[in-house]
Image (cartoon, rainbow, N blue to C red):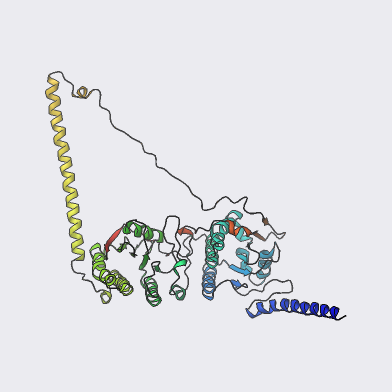
Amino acid sequence: MDKKRMTFKAFFISLLAVLSLQAAVPQANQAQGFTTDKDGLYEWAGPVMDVSGLLTPEDRGDLETFLKQLQEDTGIPLAVMVVPSMNGDAAFCTKHLQKWQKEQPAFESGALLTIATSDNRVGMGKGKKALERLTSELTDQVFDDYLIPDYSAGRKAESIRKAVLRTAVILSGDESLTFQRSKQALMVKPVKAEYRTDKEGRYEWTGSFVLDAADILSAAQYGELAGYLLDLNDSTGVQIAVLTVPTTDGEPVHDFAVRHFEKWQLGQKGVDNGALLTIVMDSHDLDITTGDGTEGVLTDILCKRIIDDVLVPAFRGGTQGSGVISAVHNMAGIITKDDSLVTVSRSGGEAEDAKWYEILGGAAIFFLLMFLLGKAIIGGLKDILDVVLGSFGIDLGKTSGGSKKGTSYSGSSSSYSSSSRSSYSTSRPYRYRYDDDDDSYSSSSYSSSSYSSLSSSSSSSSSSSYRSGGGGRTSGGGASGKW
């Protein structure tokens, strides 16, 4: 009898525990600002509804700012919902869109990206007008190329930002859209493990103008420099970036720097007012690369002076961080003509550069004239020789063993196409697509149990959420040195 009582008591306690746990779930949601209706659908709580608590406050703030600005500028509502589970409901996204449209009719042209963290599923609900742009094929692209690779590699917040940005570009048709993290977040120094490279060995843009992969800056120095360069960009449009790396694996530092400049597109498009300071620790290389629009002011001579007079003494003296900050201030002061920031001598910089360009230009003209003159002289001698030999019945063309033939060639340029999307038809045991009876909406989703089987390589710079946003170019100007 006692045994039965104990068994019943244990069962009763377990039942109470289960009921308490179930009751705690909606309470937790309510505490976070998320409530559900009688049908279990979440009430609207803003464009970013992170029920699972996957995102940091900074990440949520960045997403909300971007999505609110998108709707204000384009009229397109785009929302993100991160939930523990979709509860096996194939129409989960669509039901929420239908519910929210009663309060916000604009959702007919909008979309809802949903990530279920426990189910490992993602879904996209689309309003009727959004279907014209956000087709099934493009939805697959958002999932396969922008969301899943980084999500499966553990970069979940970044994967969501990439997917959101790509969806926004598709819906708006505006390829120039960019996504910048909050200033405060960009002033916090990342750990080295957060820096990633693409398949060509170039570091991915992080949103911050300081990428300290060599870890030579203290947290305070990083924050000071990152904040200054963000302010510089906001107030003047000038984009100066700093890149420190442990090694280039033998690649010449200037080539390495130019490849990063081109990937990050530093400077405003058409103005090209960017510059890049690159530091390589194992080879002791220093390099300043200038944009097309800055090399006329931040000349090669002045770049060399910043390296020799500011960076080299600092690195040899063990004050690398302060040296980098001083070098950046000099670069910014010269570009913006703020003499209060410049410590290197500016006298003769432009004149010396002009002199070298004049010398090179003069030399090129001289050799061209000599070439043309020599060709004329040789041609004249040949004509005279033809006349003399012709008087003896000798054809100069035949003395070479036959008729003269012009040399010609054709070159075929090699081309290739690559796709970041690998074949995965057999790696997804469970994938489905569905359309609801209500043709005002359509949803796409699939099980992402294949997350772990998909490539975790990062997307190209054009798909990155964190481009510099400039579109600037460089012709390779600048200078290099060693400490």
Give the image location of residue 316, x and y in percent: 27, 70
Vertical position of residue 180 compared to residue 259: above or below: below
Of residues 421 and 363, the one nearer the viewer is: 421
Q: Quadrant of residue 440?
A: bottom right
Of residues 319 and 479, the one nearer the viewer is: 319
Vertical position of residue 257 compared to residue 221: above or below: above
Q: Quadrant of residue 289?
A: bottom left
Of residues 194 and 206, the one nearer the viewer is: 194
Q: Which residue lies furthest to the top in this view?
A: 393
Q: How many marks?
A: 0
**Residue 116 shown left or right of residue 371 in the figure:** right
Give the image location of residue 282, x and y in percent: 34, 63
**Residue 35 shown left or right of residue 149 in the figure:** right
Of residues 301 and 291, the one nearer the viewer is: 301
Q: Which residue is drawn at 42% across and 69% down?
A: 208
Name the quarter where the N terminus is drawn.
Answer: bottom right
Does any portion of residue 134 appear in the rendered image? Answer: no
Does any portion of residue 36 appear in the rendered image? Answer: yes
